[in-house]
Image (cartoon, rainbow, N blue to C red):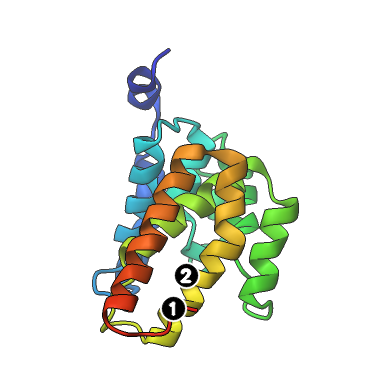
Amino acid sequence: MNDLEILQRMILAPWIYKGTALIGVARRVGGNQFRHNMATMAILIDYHYTDPILLKASVIHDLFEDTSYVTHEEIRDLDTDGPNVIDLVLEVTRPKEILKSTYLEKILKAGTWNAKILKCADRISNLTDLHYGIFTEDDMNGYLDETEKFLLPMAEEVNDNMLTELRDLLTRRRDLLQRLNVDTR
């Protein structure tokens, strides 16, 4: 089957419906977390990922970080992929008590293939929303440094095209900061 045939047979509606719980979660750049999750899924499709578990997880990947009223059991019971989707979502969900750098290093060193792909797509979406004026220079530089340290090696491992896009986004954001005479480390 080609990508289109795989996508035509995939049932995403229940997953998208669960993802709508994120509509009420505002993003600092405007919009909401639901749109970000849908953008993450679109990035995966753009890179020809058609694995149902990966796409379903992308639609709800921030659900447990940003809401508290959708249960693991609800997700697990959505369809036969539910147990695998919940495992992937939990793998990319950062517990609040763990430093972000520790969490990203764990995924880099011991994460599953799908977790690394999902994190790369998530970071591409987040970098496209990383705008000067909304984020402080320190926040932007920290996020770019984190991307360089953890996400570039992930992308290098899983997808050369994602690596190219992440590098391009890094370069563009650092160039912007440099033009604004901001420290880019």
User: Which residue corresponds to mark 1?
Assistant: 184
**Taking 150 as reference, is 60 left or right?**
left
Q: x, y (%) of residue 164? A: 43, 45
User: Which residue corresponds to mark 2?
Assistant: 144
Q: Residues within 10 Å of mark 1 (few under 14, many from 20)?
A: some
Mark drawn on residue 82: none
Real-space CA distance between mark 2 and mark 1, rounded to the nearest whole angstrom: 9 Å
SS for tag 2?
helix
Callout 1 amino acid: Thr
**Taking 117 as reference, is 157 left or right?**
right
Q: x, y (%) of residue 12? A: 38, 38
Are the residues flagged by discs 2 and 1 in contact, CB closer than 8 Å? Answer: yes
* Residue at x 33% of width, y 69% of height: 175
* Residue at x 31% of width, y 67% of height: 129
Residue sitting farthest toward the top:
1
User: Which of the 4 image quarters holds residue 168?
Assistant: bottom left
Callout 2 amino acid: Leu
Q: Residues within 10 Å of mark 2 (few under 14, many from 20)?
A: many
Front-most of 37 and 110?
110
The answer to whether residue 80 is seen in the rendering is yes
Q: Earlier in the sequence, mark 2 or mark 1?
A: 2
Q: x, y (%) of residue 58? A: 45, 49
Query: Quick check: 169 above or below 87?
Result: below
Q: Dividing the image into 4 quarters, which one contains the N terminus?
A: top left
* Residue at x 33% of width, y 21% of height: 4
